[in-house]
C-alpha cells in the first residue's frame, strides 16, 4: 500500500475491519501516509465465505468511491510522534502528555505519589498491567552503570512504530521491569537482535497470534547475573529473578519504545502469559554437547543472547522411555499437528518465500537427563535434527484438506502440488532449522516451542554492550 501511494502515486483505499482501525491508523502514520482513506467493514475477512466477503465489500462501496475520488488532507509532516516519551497514536482514547522533560507526580507522601504514577502509567497504556518500578532519575542513572555505552546512543529504530531505542530509554524500561544494571547488556543485545530481518519483528508484535520473543543466554554472564538454567527456568519464583526481569523489560521496551500497544499494533486475539517473560539460560554444565553459542561460532568464554519469535511452548512428556529412539518417537508425534501454532503452517510453501536460510526454526528444549541419554548413545544434535526432519512429517493429503490450501492449491510449493497424497511433508524446510537447547531440571519433560512465522533465531554478543 505504501509503495502504491508514495512511490507509484496510485490512489488506494484500504478495507479495514472496525476492530482494527487503531492498528491501521498507527501503521499508516508510521509509514508517512497518515491520512490514507479506509473503507470500514464489520468483520475480518479471515474464515469468511466468498458470499460474506462480497456482502461486506458491497456495503463499503460508497466509502471506497469516496476514498478514490475525494482529495485527502495534507499530511502533518510528522512521520512519528516524539519517541523520548513514547505514546499511542493521537486518537488513542487515553492520550498521555508528550514531553522531553521528566513527568512529576506530586502528593502528600511518597505512597500517594507512587500510586499516582502507577495509575497514570496504566491509564496511558505504558504498563504491562503489573506494578512498575518508578523510573526516577537516580534509578535510571543506577541502571546505566550496567553499560559503558553513551545513554544517547541509539541501538536501533524499533518496530512497529520505528521508536528510537536509545540506551537511556531502554534503561528506563529496564528499571520499570525490575531489572538490575548487570542485566542491561543482555537486554541491549536482545533489542539489537530483534531488529535483524530474520527475526521478523513486525509479525511478532503485530499479529493476531500470541507470538512472543523467546530469549536464551549463553556464556559466563549466566553465572554472573544469576540466570536460571535449571528447574522451572521458565516458571515463577525467586530463582528466576533475572530471567523474569529481563523478559519483562523486553516486553515494556517493545510497547513503550517500539509502540506495540495492545489494540493499537498488537492485535493478539487471545494472548498468552508468555508475553510477559520467556527467558532461559542454557544448562551448559549438564549438556553433553558444546553450548549453543559455540555452535554458532562464538568462543566458549564469550557471552551471547539469542532471540526467536515463538507461539509459546508445548510439553512433551515421556517418563517411560530410557532410550534416544524412545524419546524421538514421542517428540516426532508431538510436533506434527497442522496449523499456524504448530509451526508447520509454512512447511508446504516454497522456501524462496521466506527471509531466512532454513525457513521457520522451531526450538526443542531438552532437560539434561534426556540430553545425556542422547549423548551416551552417540546422538549428536545434527543426528537428532536429521531424524526429526525425516520422521516428523504430515501427509500431503492432510495438508490438501486444510481450508487454506484447499481453497488456494497454488500456495503449495511446486514440488508438493503433484505429489501423491501419502507423501510426507516435513515440519521444517531443512534439518538445520531445529534449534536444540539444554535447559531445566530432573525428569524427562521436554518442551517444543513452535516458531512465530517464517523467522529464525538471531544471536548477538552480550559482551559488546558491557
Image (cartoon, rainbow, N blue to C red):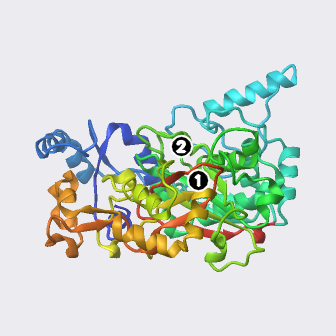
On screen, residue 125 versus residue 409, left or right, reads right
Answer yes or no: is residue 345 visible. yes
At which x and y percent is residue 464?
76, 72
Residue at image point 50% right, 61% down: 323
Residue at image point 31% right, 45% down: 16
Circle 1: element type: loop
Q: Which mark is residue 222?
A: none
At which x and y percent is residue 26?
47, 48
At which x and y percent is residue 418?
13, 72
Circle 2: element type: loop
At which x and y percent is residue 374?
55, 66
Among all residues in the image, which is located at the extreme top?
108
Quarter holding the C terminus is bottom right
On screen, residue 138 versus residue 200, left or right, reads right
Residue at image point 46% right, 71% down: 385
Identify the image quadrant of residue 59.
top left
Residue at image point 20% right, 56% down: 398
Identify the image quadrant of residue 274.
top right
Answer yes or no: is residue 31 visible. no
Q: Nearer the viewer, residue 4 or 73?
A: 4
**Which class describes the residues within 10 Å of circle 2: few (<14), some (14-19), or many (20+)?**
many
On screen, residue 196 versus residue 415, left or right, reads right
**Which class describes the residues within 10 Å of circle 1: few (<14), some (14-19), or many (20+)?**
many
Question: Residue at label 1?
Answer: 258
Using the image, determine if residue 310 lies above or below residue 3.
above
Question: Residue at label 2?
Answer: 261
Amino acid at each position: 500500500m505504501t509503495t502504491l501511494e508514495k512511490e507509484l502515486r496510485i490512489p488506494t483505499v484500504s478495507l479495514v475491519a472496525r476492530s482494527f482501525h487503531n492498528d491501521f491508523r498507527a501503521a499508516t502514520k508510521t509509514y508517512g501516509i497518515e491520512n490514507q482513506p479506509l473503507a470500514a467493514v464489520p468483520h475480518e475477512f479471515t474464515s469468511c465465505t466468498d458470499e460474506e466477503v462480497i456482502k461486506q465489500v458491497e456495503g463499503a462501496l460508497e466509502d471506497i468511491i469516496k476514498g478514490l475520488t475525494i482529495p485527502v488532507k495534507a499530511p502533518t509532516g510528522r512521520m512519528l510522534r516524539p519517541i523520548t516519551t513514547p505514546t499511542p497514536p493521537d486518537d488513542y482514547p487515553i492520550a498521555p502528555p508528550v514531553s522531553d522533560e521528566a513527568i512529576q507526580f506530586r502528593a502528600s507522601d511518597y505512597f500517594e505519589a507512587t500510586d499516582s504514577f502507577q495509575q497514570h502509567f496504566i491509564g496511558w497504556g505504558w504498563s504491562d498491567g503489573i506494578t512498575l518500578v518508578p523510573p526516577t532519575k537516580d534509578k535510571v542513572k543506577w541502571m546505566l552503570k550496567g553499560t559503558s555505552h553513551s545513554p544517547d546512543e541509539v541501538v536501533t529504530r524499533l518496530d512497529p512504530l520505528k521508536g528510537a531505542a536509545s540506551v537511556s530509554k531502554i534503561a528506563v524500561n529496564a528499571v520499570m521491569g525490575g531489572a538490575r544494571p548487570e542485566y542491561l547488556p543482555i537486554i541491549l543485545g536482545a533489542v539489537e537482535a530483534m531488529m535483524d530481518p530474520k527475526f521478523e519483528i513486525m509479525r511478532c508484535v503485530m499479529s493476531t497470534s500470541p507470538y512472543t520473543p523467546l530469549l536464551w543466554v549463553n556464556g559466563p554472564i549466566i553465572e554472573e547475573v544469576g540466570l536460571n538454567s535449571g528447574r522451572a527456568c521458565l516458571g515463577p519464583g525467586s530463582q528466576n529473578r533475572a530471567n523474569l526481569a529481563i523478559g519483562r523489560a523486553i516486553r515494556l521496551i517493545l510497547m513503550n519504545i517500539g509502540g506495540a500497544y495492545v489494540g493499537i499494533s498488537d492485535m493478539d486475539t487471545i494472548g498468552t502469559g508468555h508475553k510477559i517473560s520467556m527467558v532461559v539460560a542454557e544448562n551448559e554444565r549438564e549438556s553433553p554437547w558444546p553450548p549453543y553459542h559455540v555452535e554458532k561460532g562464538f568462543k566458549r568464554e564469550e557471552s551471547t543472547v539469542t532471540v526467536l519469535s515463538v507461539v509459546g511452548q508445548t510439553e512433551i512428556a515421556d517418563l517411560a522411555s530410557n532410550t534416544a529412539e524412545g524419546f524421538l518417537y514421542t517428540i516426532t508425534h508431538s510436533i506434527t499437528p497442522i496449523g499456524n501454532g504448530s509451526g508447520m503452517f509454512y512447511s508446504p510453501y516454497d522456501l524462496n518465500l521466506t527471509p531466512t536460510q532454513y525457513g521457520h526454526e522451531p526450538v526443542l528444549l531438552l532437560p539434561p537427563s534426556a540430553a545425556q541419554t542422547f549423548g551416551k548413545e552417540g546422538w549428536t544434535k545434527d543426528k537428532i535434527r536429521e531424524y526429526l526432519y525425516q520422521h516428523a512429517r504430515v501427509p500431503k493429503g492432510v495438508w490438501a484438506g486444510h481450508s487454506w490450501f484447499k481453497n488456494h492449491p497454488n500456495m503449495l510449493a511446486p514440488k508438493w502440488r503433484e505429489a501423491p497424497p501419502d507423501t510426507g511433508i516435513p515440519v521444517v524446510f531443512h534439518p538445520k532449522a531445529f534449534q536444540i537447547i539444554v535447559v531445566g531440571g530432573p525428569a524427562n519433560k521436554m518442551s517444543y516451542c513452535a516458531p512465530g512465522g517464517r523467522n529464525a533465531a538471531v544471536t548477538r554478543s552480550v559482551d559488546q554492550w558491557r
